[in-house]
Structure formats: C-alpha cells, structure tokens
C-alpha cells in the first residue's frame, strides 16, 4: 500500500488557489479564469507581502522600545556599538534591497565619536507629556523672597511657567549633586559591559576587556591595593574620641600580670598571656568577647607571646633556655631548645620579622640570636658592643635595629649580617626599647630616664642625629612602645607607675590630653596592641585584666 493519495489534486487547481489567496490579500479583483499570472509574478507578490509584514514588525518594535524607554528609562534600551550601521541596514531594507549584517568591533569604529553621538541623543530626548498651561502661565519671581535666587539678572521679574520649571530643576541639581555611580551614562556602560561578558561566556570566547576603560582595568590588575576606597580623613590632634568596652578577657581573667596581648591579622582573635603560665585566645566583638581556647605551660611563666605575621603559629618565651611554638592549625604545642651552640640563660625577649622568616632573640653579652621560623634552628648571630636590650625590624625584615647599655642604635643588614650604621641616641645613656613605624620611615627609641626620641630613619642614616621630636611625658623607664597600623598613633608605656600610658598624635607630635582621663584606671599597664584596622586598642595590666577600648576615628577593627 502507498501512503500517497490516489486522487491527487491537479496542478492547475493548486495554482488557481494560490493566486486567489494572494489577490484577496492585496485587493486585486482579477479573475483567475481570464488568465493565470506566471510563477514569477506570484513570487514577487509574496516578497512584497513579506517585506510589508517585516516593516510593520520593525515599526511595532520601535514603538515598543520608545514606550519602554519613556516608562522605565534607558535600562531597557542600552546603547550598543554599531547602532548607526544597523539603522542604515534597515533603511536599505526598506528600499527593497537585501538585508545584511555589519559586525562592528571596537577597532572598526571610533568609540569617542560614537559615545558623543549617543550622549547627544540622550540629552535631546523629548518629554513624554508637555503641559500647555506652563507656556501660558506667568510667574513673578521678584515678589517672593525665596524665588529671587532664581533670577539671572537683577531686574528680572516675570518669567514663563516652562522657564520657571527649568530653573527650579537647575537649582535642585545644584543643591543636590548626584553621585558618579548613579549617573545614567555609567549605568549604561555597566549594563553594556555585563551584556558583552555574558555573550562572550555563552560563545566560549575570551576577549580583552575594556573598550574605553582599558587603562583603568590595567591599573587595577597591576596593583595589589584594596579596591574599596578608604577614608582619607586624617586623625585630629588634641582630644581622642574613644569609649570603654567590655574587658577582652572578661570570661576568664588571669591570676597573674598580663605580659603580652596581640591581635591576630584577622582582627577577631586576641592573644593574652602572662605569668600564670596560660595563653588564652578570645574572639573580640566588643560585647561578649568569647573565650575560644586556653593553653597551659607547666614549666614556663610567659614573658612574651606573639603571633607570626602570617598568623599560623604563636611563639612563646619566658625566663628559660628554651621556648615554645603553638601551631594554631594543628592545636599542638612544641618545645624548642636549648639552641645548639649557645648557652643562654633566658630567651624572654624576641622579635619576629614582618615576613615571618626570622625570629631574633636577645642573648648574653650583647649577642643577638637569629632563628629560622620554619626549622626553629639557629642560623646566625650578631654582636653589639654593649648589652643588647631591645630589637625592632625594618625594611620588610631585611634590616634589624638594636640598642642597649651603650646608648647607641645599631642598624643591621640581615642579608649580609653586618652592621652598616651605628649612632648615639641623643641624650640616652641606657636604651630600653625600640619601635619602628609600619612603613619604616620613623623609629622611636626609649630610655630608662623616660625620654623617647623619634627619628626620621633616612635622616638618621644620612648623618642627622637630632630627633624630630623628644617626648618627655613619662618620668620612669620606658618599657613598651607601639605604632598603630597607619602610624598616626604612638603608644608609650611604663610599667613602674600607675596609669603611665601615653598616646601621641604622630603627625603633630602632640600627646592626647584626655588620655588617660581622670576616671580611667589602667592600674599598672604592661603591654598594649592595636587591631589591624585601628578600631580596637587592648591594654594588659598587672591586675590580670585586658582592657578594651574603641577608637571612634577608625571604622574597622
């Protein structure tokens, strides 16, 4: 059996039927019985009909886009590259020629001229509705006092309603300037770039981004700075804005003096250690300050504990021949030492390089012991003339500063392990502590007389021995100093006197007069640290408490 019909319709009847349909559409009343049109004429009629339908659809689409643009703004009609070429193609199609597509890339079109044309089009957009009464209305802007600012000339009084509306809009725009991210052009560019990226992802094409913003993208990719714009407002001298928060170790106080407090680089974890042989970790939020963990060292009252700058370990030392290393990831304590080749009685004072590669311990008879933070083995020694009492790293860990009983400040190059500069700290007989700013431009040197000298490091190395500031606010031995993260505050501490903690405004070299206040009871402060963002300040004292303060100038911890 065959699926083809055994009674096929004749070819002439099919042609007659097609002609009837075409003629009925185009309004032609020709009689098919008088003579049939040729196949070419039929195809022409079909082509005309199709072109008219396409033209109607294009007009409808244009009207819909205009309506969407008026109702919802330009977000529904983003500007596209090659728009002028597409419009020319549509004009050619309306004339009857064949349609074609132009693939216009940024290299083929001058983007500056095209963007200018598009901006002109947006500026010249007409209003959807115009009130005819505005043209006929006259307003006297000289009568009312609050409208006189709209005058362009002194003698001007009566203006039309439309002019009055435009001046009001201009006055509003003047008083309320818009932000960059809310401007129409930037929104269009963002929408367009998003569409380009999504279309490239669909086509599995990887292209160089940024037509007109190539330089901006390159600048972003060439730097490791934060993309978020930070506040550039300088910290003001005079009075410090701060508030007291819940004690950092409120959940578990120490039974002995606190000798070390330090914030982890994530600004949420705080370390507190002291002579009770415990190292406690707290999650700092300023409200509850939850205790996370406590580590007990049976044979080592803690003199100093410090995070490695990379945040992976804690180095703990006391008045012992050995020291401890606590691994934060594995939660494991390792006992290290005594160091091979050295007979040291105490390793209680040390500093860690900013690159987390080297730990420098103070040894006997002016020796400085360099220990690798990876292997925990002795890798070198440095020798001073007098007794070494303080250390400070500079130049991202490539240089080391030291001072001691001879009153001189030594500069060491750790790559060659040689002293490349040595000079007397002005007015100092016995140096007790050193501190360098985060950027390494300044360093502060404290002495047992309570005097703190602040130097510009480049000037000091260049031969200028006079300090840029001499701080004389303490009368007892300076035991501890610390710059905050942006080097605008320098904390100076003495453990021998109550409330003996001063905060200095570094740019103006003036001490804050309201710190500590008359109502502030710091007891005997022993250590201090600022959070990485500068928002928190923790002070450990001899009573076993870690006092927590909020510095209002800084927005982040």
Image: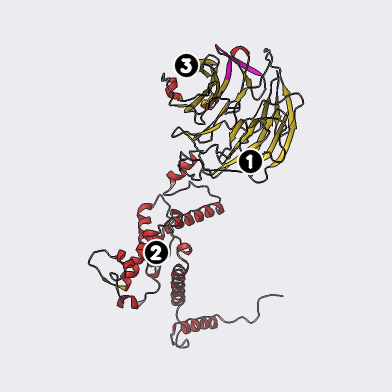
Asked if residue 388 is among those painted magenta in the image, a careful observer would answer yes
Q: CA distance from mark 1 to mark 2?
A: 59 Å
The image shows a total of numbered marks equal to 3
User: In which quadrant of the rendered image does the C terminus lie?
Assistant: top right
Up the image or down, 492 lies above or below 419; here it is below
- Part of the protein shown in magenta: 377-389
Residue at image mark 1: 268
- Residue 110 visible in the snapshot: no
Residue 32 vertical position relative to residue 379 in the rendered view, above or below: below
Viewer can see residue 459: yes
17 vs 362, left or right, is: left
The residue under label 3 is 423
Considering every residue shown, the one lying at the far front of the view is 518
Q: Label 2's element?
A: helix
Residue at screen point 66% across, 22% down? 348
Q: Residues within 10 Å of mark 2 (few under 14, many from 20)?
A: few
Mark-to-mark CA distance, 3 and 1 = 40 Å
Query: Where in the figure is residue 43, as x and y percent of width and height?
Result: 46, 74
**Dot 1, how many residues are within 10 Å of its Cα: few (below 14), some (14-19), or many (20+)?**
some
Can you tell which of label 1 and label 2 is closer to the viewer? 1
Query: Residue 261: x percent and y percent?
Result: 64, 33
Pointer 3 local density, CA inside 10 Å: few below 14, some 14–19, many at least 20: some
Q: Which residue is mark 2?
A: 87
Residue at the (49%, 16%) spot, across then down: 420
Image quadrant occupied by the N terminus: bottom right
Task: Using the image, determine if residue 439 lies above or below residue 15.
Answer: above
| Of callouts 1 and 2, the N-terminal one | 2
**As drawn, is 165 to the left or to the right of 525?**
left
- The percent position of residue 399, horizontal first and vertical second, equals 53, 22
- Asked which secondary structure carries label 3, the reply is strand
In reply to whether residue 544 is colored magenta, the answer given is: no
Indicate the quadrant where residue 402 lies: top right
């Amino acid at each position: 059996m065959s699926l083809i019909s055994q009674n096929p319709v004749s070819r002439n009847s099919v042609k007659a039927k097609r002609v009837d349909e075409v003629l009925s559409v185009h309004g032609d009343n020709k009689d098919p019985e008088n003579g049939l049109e040729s196949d070419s004429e039929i195809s022409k009629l079909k082509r005309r009909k199709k072109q008219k339908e396409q033209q109607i659809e294009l007009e409808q689409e244009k009207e819909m886009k205009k309506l969407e643009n008026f109702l919802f703004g330009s977000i529904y009609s983003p500007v596209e590259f090659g728009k002028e070429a597409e419009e020319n193609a549509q004009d050619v199609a309306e004339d009857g020629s064949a349609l074609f597509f132009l693939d216009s890339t940024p290299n083929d079109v001058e983007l500056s001229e095209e963007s200018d044309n598009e901006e002109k089009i947006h500026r010249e957009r007409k209003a959807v509705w115009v009130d005819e009464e505005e043209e006929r209305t006259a307003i006297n802007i000289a009568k009312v006092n609050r409208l006189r600012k709209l005058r362009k000339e002194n003698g001007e009084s009566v203006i039309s309603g439309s002019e009055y509306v435009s001046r009001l809009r201009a006055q509003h725009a003047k008083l309320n300037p818009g932000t960059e991210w809310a401007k129409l052009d930037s929104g269009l560019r963002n929408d367009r770039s998003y569409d380009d990226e999504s279309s490239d992802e669909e086509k599995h094409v990887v292209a160089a981004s940024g037509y007109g913003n190539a330089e901006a993208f390159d600048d972003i990719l060439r730097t490791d700075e934060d993309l978020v714009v930070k506040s550039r407002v300088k910290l003001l001298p005079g009075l410090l804005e701060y508030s007291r928060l819940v004690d950092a170790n409120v959940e578990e106080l120490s039974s002995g003096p606190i000798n070390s407090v330090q914030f982890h680089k994530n600004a949420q974890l705080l370390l507190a250690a002291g002579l009770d042989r415990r190292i406690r970790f707290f999650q700092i939020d300023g409200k509850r300050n939850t205790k996370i963990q406590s580590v007990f060292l049976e044979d080592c009252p803690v003199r100093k504990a410090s995070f490695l700058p990379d945040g992976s370990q804690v180095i703990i030392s006391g008045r012992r021949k050995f020291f401890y290393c606590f691994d934060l990831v594995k939660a494991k304590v390792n006992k290290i030492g005594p160091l091979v080749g050295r007979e040291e009685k105490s390793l209680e004072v040390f500093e860690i390089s900013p690159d987390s590669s080297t730990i420098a311990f103070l040894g006997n008879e002016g020796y400085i012991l360099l220990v690798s933070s990876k292997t925990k083995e002795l890798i070198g020694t440095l020798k001073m003339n007098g007794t070494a009492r303080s250390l400070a790293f500079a130049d991202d860990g490539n240089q080391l500063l030291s001072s001691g009983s001879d009153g001189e400040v030594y500069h060491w190059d750790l790559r060659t392990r040689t002293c490349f500069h040595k000079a007397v700290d002005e007015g100092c007989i016995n140096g007790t502590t050193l501190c360098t700013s985060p950027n390494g431009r300044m360093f502060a040197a404290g002495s047992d007389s309570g005097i703190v000298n602040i130097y510009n490091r480049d000037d000091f190395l260049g031969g200028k021995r006079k300090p840029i500031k001499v701080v004389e606010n303490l009368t007892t031995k300076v035991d501890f100093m610390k710059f905050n993260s942006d080097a605008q505050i320098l904390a100076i501490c003495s453990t021998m006197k109550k409330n003996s903690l001063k905060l200095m405004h570094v740019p103006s070299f003036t001490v804050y007069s309201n710190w500590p206040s008359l109502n502030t009871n710091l007891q005997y402060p022993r250590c201090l640290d600022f959070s990485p963002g500068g928002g928190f300040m923790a002070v450990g004292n001899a009573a076993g408490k870690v006092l927590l303060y909020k510095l209002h100038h800084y927005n982040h911890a």
